Image (cartoon, rainbow, N blue to C red):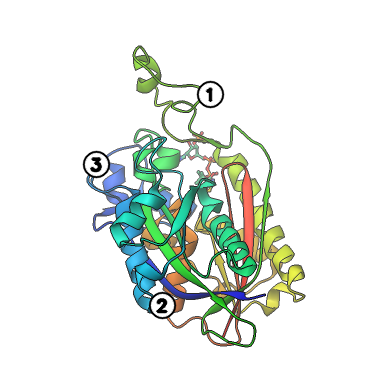
C-alpha cells in the first residue's frame, strides 16, 4: 500500500489588515480585551464582495503546487474544506478551483465541517491515496468568515477572519521515501449540537425568502456562537485528541516535535497544552496575526511551520482541530 505524503504547502490571506482598534469603532470592545481574551492583534478580511473562497483557495493552491513542484495538470483529486463557499448551495468551490488552476484530470468535491474541515479533508485524501484511488491530490482549507459574521456581535466579530491554506498530497510507493510529511494517522469524531456554533437561517431547516426582513435584521443568517460552551468543549477536546493521536501511533504526546492546533483562541490552546504538560514553545500559534480563519487555520499554521523551518526530518507533527458540529479530528505526520 502506498503512503500519503504532504510534499508542499501554501497559504493565502487577503491584503486588508484589520486591527483591533478598527473593531473598537464597530462594536463595544477594546484592543486590550481582544488581546487578553483571544490572543488576536489583527486579522485579514476581504473587502466585502471582492474576494470569495475560490480566490483565496487559488492563491494557497498555487503556492502549495509550486512548493511541491507539481503541475496542476498532474492532480487527480481536489478536496476543499469550507463552510463559506462562493455560492450558498452550488456550484462547489472544488470544481471552480480546478477550472482556475487548469486541473483538467482532477475529480473532487467540497467537504463541510467548519474548523475541523481541513483535518477531515486530509483524512479523506489519505484514504484515497493509500487505496490507490488517487495519486496526486490537493487539499485546501478555506473560509471567508467575514461573509457570515454578524458585525454587531462583539463575541464573534473579533475572533473570526478570512484565509486559506493548502497541501499537495502524493502517493509514495512502499520503499520510495518521497520527502515531506507522511500522514501516519488521521481520525475524526463528532456529536450533534445545533447551539454551540450555528448559522440559524438560510439552510433547508429555515430557508430564507421574501418576507424575512425581520429575521435578516436580527442577523439569523449569520454565525451564532455560545462562547463559553465552545470554550469548555474546545479545551477538553483539544487535549483528548492530542492524546488519542499519540496513542494511535504508539508514542506519548511529549514525543511530538510540534503540535499544529486549530487557531481557535490562544487561551484555549494554552489551557489544553497546560493540561497535557506539553511545552508551549513546540506549539504553532499564529492567531495573533491571522485570527481564527476556520477551515484555513490548520493549513495556514502548518505552512508557516514548514516555511519557518520548524519541521525537520524525523519529526512527528500532530495536527488537531475541532469546531461546529460539534466535530473534531487529528492527524499525525512524520517528516522525512
Ligand atoms: N469585547 C468586550 N467584551 C466582550 C467581548 C468583546 N469582544 N465579547 C464578549 N464580551 C463580554 C461579554 O459580553 C461578557 O460581558 P458580561 O459579563 O457583561 O455579560 C464578558 O465579556 C465576559 O464574557 P465571557 O463569554 O465570559 O468571556 P470569555 O472570557 O469566555 O471570552 C470568548 C469570550 C468568546 C472570547 C470565549 O468564550 C471564547 O473564546 N470562546 C470560544 C469561542 C471560539 O473560539 N469559537 C470558535 C470555535 S471553532
Q: Residues within 10 Å of mark 3 (few under 14, many from 20)?
A: few
Q: Earlier in the sequence, mark 3 or mark 1?
A: 3
Q: Residue 205: which numbered mark, if any?
A: 1
**Gap in angstroms between the C-alphas marked 2 and 1:** 42 Å
Counting residues from the start of the chain, the first of labels 2 and 1 encountered is: 2
The quarter holding residue 2 reads bottom right
Mark in front: 2 vs 3: 2
Q: Quadrant of residue 103?
A: bottom left
**Residue labelled with disc 2:** 68
The quadrant the C terminus occupies is bottom right
Depicted 162 relative to depicted 319: above or below: above
Residue position marked by numbered label 3 in the rendering? 49
For residue 43, say whether it is visible.
no
Q: Is residue 5 above or below residue 138?
A: below
Q: Which quadrant does the N terminus fall into?
A: bottom right
Query: How far across and down, in percent of the image, does residue 335 sit?
Result: 57, 82
Q: Observer-nearest residue: 179 or 190? A: 179
Residue 313 x, y percent position in the rendering:
56, 87
Amino acid at each position: 500500500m502506498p503512503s500519503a505524503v504532504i510534499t508542499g504547502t501554501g497559504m493565502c490571506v487577503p491584503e486588508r489588515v484589520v486591527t483591533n482598534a478598527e473593531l473598537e469603532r464597530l462594536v463595544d470592545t477594546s484592543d486590550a480585551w481582544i488581546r487578553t481574551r483571544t490572543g488576536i492583534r489583527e486579522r485579514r478580511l476581504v473587502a466585502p464582495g471582492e474576494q470569495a473562497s475560490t480566490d483565496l483557495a487559488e492563491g494557497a493552491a498555487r503556492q502549495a503546487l509550486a512548493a511541491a513542484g507539481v503541475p496542476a495538470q498532474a492532480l487527480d483529486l481536489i478536496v476543499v474544506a469550507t463552510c463559506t463557499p462562493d455560492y450558498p448551495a452550488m456550484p462547489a468551490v472544488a470544481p471552480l478551483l480546478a477550472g482556475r488552476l487548469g486541473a483538467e484530470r482532477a475529480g473532487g468535491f467540497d467537504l463541510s465541517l467548519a474548523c475541523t474541515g481541513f483535518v477531515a479533508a486530509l483524512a479523506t485524501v489519505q484514504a484515497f491515496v493509500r487505496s490507490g484511488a488517487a495519486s496526486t491530490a490537493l487539499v485546501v482549507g478555506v473560509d471567508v468568515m467575514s461573509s457570515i459574521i454578524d458585525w454587531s456581535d462583539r463575541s464573534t466579530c473579533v475572533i473570526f477572519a478570512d484565509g486559506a491554506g493548502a497541501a499537495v498530497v502524493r502517493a509514495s510507493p512502499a520503499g520510495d521515501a518521497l520527502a515531506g510529511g507522511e500522514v501516519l494517522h488521521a481520525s475524526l469524531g463528532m456529536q450533534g449540537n445545533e447551539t454551540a456554533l450555528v448559522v440559524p437561517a438560510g439552510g433547508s431547516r429555515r430557508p430564507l425568502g421574501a418576507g424575512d426582513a425581520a429575521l435578516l435584521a436580527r442577523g439569523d443568517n449569520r454565525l451564532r456562537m455560545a462562547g463559553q460552551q465552545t470554550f469548555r468543549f474546545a479545551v477538553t477536546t483539544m487535549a483528548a485528541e492530542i492524546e488519542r493521536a499519540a496513542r494511535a501511533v504508539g508514542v506519548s504526546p511529549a514525543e511530538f516535535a510540534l503540535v499544529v492546533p486549530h487557531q481557535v483562541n490562544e487561551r484555549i490552546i494554552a489551557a489544553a497544552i497546560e493540561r497535557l504538560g506539553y511545552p508551549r514553545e513546540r506549539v504553532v500559534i499564529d492567531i495573533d496575526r491571522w485570527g481564527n480563519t476556520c477551515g484555513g487555520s490548520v493549513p495556514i499554521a502548518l505552512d508557516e511551520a514548514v516555511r519557518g523551518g520548524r519541521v525537520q526530518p524525523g519529526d512527528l507533527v500532530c495536527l488537531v482541530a475541532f469546531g461546529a458540529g460539534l466535530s473534531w479530528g487529528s492527524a499525525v505526520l512524520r517528516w522525512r
